[in-house]
Amino acid sequence: MRPRKVKGFPLFSYYGSKSKLAPLYDRPRFDTIVEPFAGSAAYSLDGDNWRKNVVLYDSNPKVAAVWDYLIHATDADIAALPDVHPGQKVTDFGQLSQAERWLIGFNINRGSSMPKVTASRRSDGLRYRKALLENHHKVKHWKIFNASYETAPNREATWFVDPPYQKNGQYYYGFADMDYAALGKWCLERLGQVIVCENDGADWLPFRVLTTFRGSMQSQVEVVWTQDSPGGGAHSHEPSSASGSA
Ligand SMILES: C[S@@+](CC[C@H](N)C(=O)[O-])C[C@H]1O[C@@H](n2cnc3c(N)ncnc32)[C@H](O)[C@@H]1O
């Protein structure tokens, strides 16, 4: 099965982003989408999903800081970001905040799980700034928590759960601490609509094949597990306290 045309636009490039696969997952049925393993949150940016109450969690402080920046940045902030050309370093631009360096660092070396300092040959500074200017308004009402997934209060929502892969997630911050049996139990307990992403070979939930796609090195089988709370309503609420953002 081939992914249909992507309507969303990622605000930063990220290793393992679901930007191409996002259209293949079930549509959100609740007013709130929670991404407890946010990364670049491609599912929440797909199509019109961004209009929902989107609540993100990521234990990586750099990822959380970039989201916090994107949520609060003005057009003027983004228009002032420099073009970092191939071979240049983000540290050459003394006026940048740390979060701006990390944001640019993700975009100048695409598909990385950590922000880079030196722009690669494929870097295109103008393109990411234009895309940010056109799309950052989508996230103004979103929330980001620099916290582990277990801290998310359970409530009726669409839970889009995309953790580091059990078999191949070693490139992500936090992989060494992952307890997949505990995560599987946590997923079973979520209220509302639950969509869990994994790769072929994962055994912590009864996954089924979603699609096969061409990865950067080889063909990959993406699997999914879904659950809907019986009788769940189609409305959910914002968390009462929004402390803990990066
Ligand atoms: C596979 S990536 C998510 C990709 C995302 N769906 C996207 O479209 O870009 C997994 C993310 O989980 C984060 N992470 C790892 N351990 C975590 C934990 N215990 N709690 C929350 N986030 C965690 C990593 O920093 C990483 O950003």
Image (cartoon, rainbow, N blue to C red):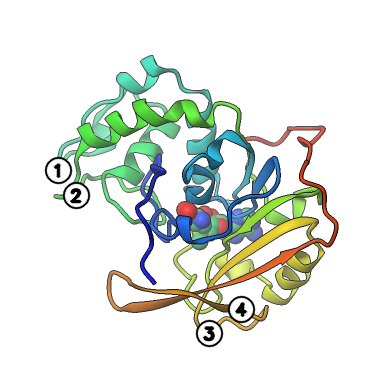
Instruction: Answer above or below: position of 206 versus 80.
Output: below
Q: Amino acid at mark 2?
A: Ser
Are the residues tagged 1 and 2 within 8 Å (C-beta)? yes
Q: Residues within 10 Å of mark 4 (few under 14, many from 20)?
A: some
Q: Residues within 10 Å of mark 1 (few under 14, many from 20)?
A: some
Q: What distance separates the C-alpha of mark 4 from that of mark 3?
A: 9 Å
83 vs 68, left or right, is left
Specify which label sits upstream in the sequence, 4 or 3: 3
Q: What distance separates the C-alpha of mark 2 from that of mark 3?
A: 33 Å
Are the residues tagged 4 and 1 within 8 Å (C-beta)? no
Camera-side mark, 4 or 1:
4
Q: Amino acid at mark 4?
A: Phe
Camera-side mark, 4 or 2:
4
Q: Amino acid at mark 1?
A: Pro
Q: Position of residue 219 (x, y in %)?
A: 33, 79
Q: Which residue is rendered at x = 41% and y = 27% of the image?
A: 97
22 vs 153, left or right, is left
Q: Farthest residue in the right direction? A: 231
Specify which label sits upstream in the sequence, 4 or 2: 2
Specify which label sits upstream in the sequence, 4 or 1: 1
Query: Disc 1 marks which residue?
Result: 86
Query: Disc 4 marks which residue?
Result: 207
Q: What distance separates the C-alpha of mark 4 from that of mark 2?
A: 37 Å
Q: Position of residue 138 (x, y in %)?
A: 49, 30
Query: Disc 2 marks which residue?
Result: 120
Query: Disc 3 marks which residue?
Result: 201
Q: Residues within 10 Å of mark 3 (few under 14, many from 20)?
A: some
On-image quarter of the N terminus: bottom left
- Is residue 173 visible in the rendered image? The answer is no
Under tag 3, what secondary structure? Answer: loop
